[in-house]
Amino acid sequence: MYDEIRDRSLFELATSYAQEFISTAFDRNVYPTEEALTNLNQFDEDIPQQPGDAKEILSFLHRHGSPAAVTQIGGRYFGFVNGSVVPAGLAAKNLAIYWDQNTAMQVLSPISSKLEQVVQRWLVQLLGLPADTVAGFVSGSSMANFCGLAAARYRILKNQDWELAEKGLFGAPKVRIVTCTQAHSTVLKAISLLGLGKGNIEWVDVDDEGRIIPEQIPPLDSQTILILQAGNVNSGAFDDFEQICRRAKDQGAWIHVDGAFGLWAAATQNLRHLTSGYQLADSWTVDGHKTLNTPYDSGIVLCADQEALVSALHMTGDYIVTGHDRDGMFFTPEMSRRARVVELWATLRYLGWQGVDELVQGLHERARQFTSALSDAEGFQVLNDVVFNQVLVSCASDELTDKVIAKVQELRTCWVGGSFWNGRRVIRISVCSWATTPEDVSRSADSFKEALAQVLRSNDHV
């Protein structure tokens, strides 16, 4: 292996394969062909008895793996809230892969420590958060919500003189959880993992757009965590932070905002109104790999109570060497953790404030284009008020909607998924890629129309 790690041709080969893939990503089918999916069976082999040849392994991976990759980095992937990649961020990630940094402590990776400090400051400025807000760089919204709610749990119990790290939850004072009936699954997962119990949630109804109804929120207190949304996962709608947060703060509640893809609206001129008042919260979550288009995985927890976040993610050890600046492990559950902040830094430095504004606004404009194209098409109905990047579309019946989804996926011009909305089966369109052009939307809308026509021409529809 000493020779291989010095062999530039091995890494140049990997780069050539990567460039071959990315050079065709905007033109190829969005979802793998049936042949590509079948060829994945080539990986079904017993572990080799002897060491292999590195170049042959790369060749095998590229030959059978690349055709089976979903090209979500292109402009016609709308299935989930999966962003593309800003080229500068992807290139920076590639460089950082070779560094292979462990970001637990400053002494382990001074460059990671510095970039985490810088990006934290940039995020606070960009999103208009309280000046003392701190950030933890985690894998995604699942872990970010876990961290934010862990900080909330710590603070609520600490204020009642309950040392959670020492005493645990057995016999602890009650922590109330109040959230809406359409809270994202990652929020529910975090509540479960934290031992707070999904069965203890005080549910609040939502309106027709998926926003929590302020008048139905029960009286809150200092033992309550109120969880709000910046971007409903289906409709993209935002809760009324201005009205809700002021009342919740007066009642002493901890406010957590799940803003996985929607929080970036705060960084724009034209969409900032959607987040008005959200700065009054105590913790927030947001993903870079969604709306901001950083490579996977790039989740961020933001917390205005540094002591609560650090104490909730408690880490000690005689061998630990604390730095004079930032030690990343105090802001995340993990100790060993890759330097995902590198590509986040590169993306933000490349885009700048103006670029972030244009990127996020562009996603909204393409979503509005989808809305117009399908509203005007016979057989389709847009069901939500498109305020951000999410579009919900249905056909005449749930069965027909499902068959159109399947046919769109089969045609492979674009890729979409389905969901349920207000009792109806819907096509869920998530516009998340900087690469999505007006032509991409037109082609995709035409694919929807062709899919519906093919289903109606068949004998298998209702």
Image (spheres, helix red, strand yellow):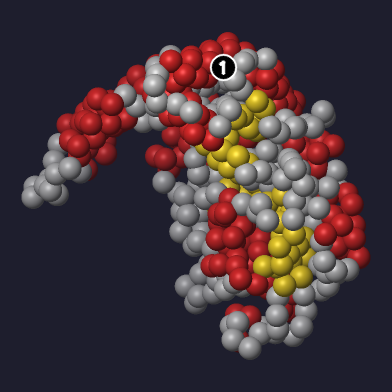
Foreground of the two, 334 or 346: 334
Can residue 435 be seen in this snapshot?
yes
Looking at the rendered image, the quarter that the N terminus falls into is: top left
Foreground of the two, 244 or 163: 244
Q: Residue at x 26, y 39 (%)?
A: 5
Q: Residue at x 17, y 42 (%)?
A: 44
Residue 134 occupies which quadrant of the picture? Answer: bottom right
Q: Which residue is mark 1?
A: 445
Q: Is residue 351 left or right of residue 41?
A: right
In the rendered view, tell whether residue 391 sits above or below residue 28: below
SS at circle 1:
helix
Disc 1 marks a residue whose amino acid type is: Ala
Which residue ends up furthest to the left in the rendered image?
A: 49
Q: Residue at x 59, y 20 (%)?
A: 379
Q: How many marks?
A: 1
Q: Position of residue 292 (x, y in %)?
A: 62, 34
Q: Position of residue 293 (x, y in %)?
A: 58, 32
Can residue 72 be seen in this snapshot?
no
Q: Position of residue 375 (x, y in %)?
A: 68, 19
In the rendered view, tell whether residue 136 sits above or below residue 94: below
In the rendered view, tell whether residue 115 sits above or below residue 406: below
Residue 191 occupies which quadrant of the picture? Answer: bottom right
Foreground of the two, 59 or 398: 398
Question: Which class describes the residues within 10 Å of circle 1: few (<14), some (14-19), or many (20+)?
Answer: many
Q: Position of residue 372 (x, y in %)?
A: 69, 17
Q: Residue at x 15, y 36 (%)?
A: 53
Foreground of the two, 70 or 414: 414
Q: Is residue 390 left or right of residue 400?
A: right
